[in-house]
Image (cartoon, rainbow, N blue to C red):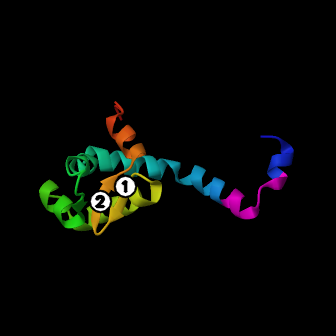
Amino acid sequence: MSHSSYIKETALEAKENAQRIAFAPVVFQSALSLRNLGILQIIEDNRNSGISLNNISSRLNLPIYGVRVLLESGLNIGLVTESEDNYHLTKPAILFYTMNLHV
């Protein structure tokens, strides 16, 4: 990135870029938790109709609050979508879910 492109960047764009860098570890850990706790898997298993927060929580025997926090994170980072109270995976989520990460 050249010096002139920094000048063209608005203050809001600079703030968004700085926040993206600062929150990267949190975003990654949220995504990893969604995967490791089986949330992405259960959403994928119900890909045709989607699955509700309550059903995810009860089927995985996880606290509803924790599942809600992770799903909200997933919405914000673009891993899941919500339609009529049911969650669905996005294409990036499917790619992340299938990656062989040993973390």
Describe the element under mark 1 as helix, strand or loop: strand
Residue 10 picture quarter: bottom right
Query: Between marks 2 and 1, how big is the CA–CA gap?
Result: 6 Å
- Residue at 17 percent across and 62 percent down: it is 55
Q: Residues within 10 Å of mark 1 (few under 14, many from 20)?
A: many
Describe the element under mark 2 as helix, strand or loop: strand
The answer to whether marks 2 and 1 mark residues whose Cβ atoms lie closer than 8 Å is yes
> Could you tell me residue 4's position as x and y percent?
86, 47
Is residue 69 visible in the rendered structure shown here?
no
> Could you tell me residue 33's position as x and y percent?
32, 49
Q: Which residues are magenta?
A: 7-15
In the rendered view of the protein, which quadrant contains the C terminus? Answer: top left
Residue underneath mark 2: 87
Horizontally, residue 25 falls left or right of residue 49, namely: right
Tag shown at residue 80: 1
Is residue 6 visible in the rendered structure shown here?
yes
- Residue at 34 percent across and 31 percent down: it is 102
Amino acid type indicated by mark 2: Tyr
Residue toward you, 3 or 90: 90
> Could you tell me residue 29's position as x and y percent?
40, 48
Q: Earlier in the sequence, mark 2 or mark 1?
A: 1
Magenta region, main secondary structure: helix
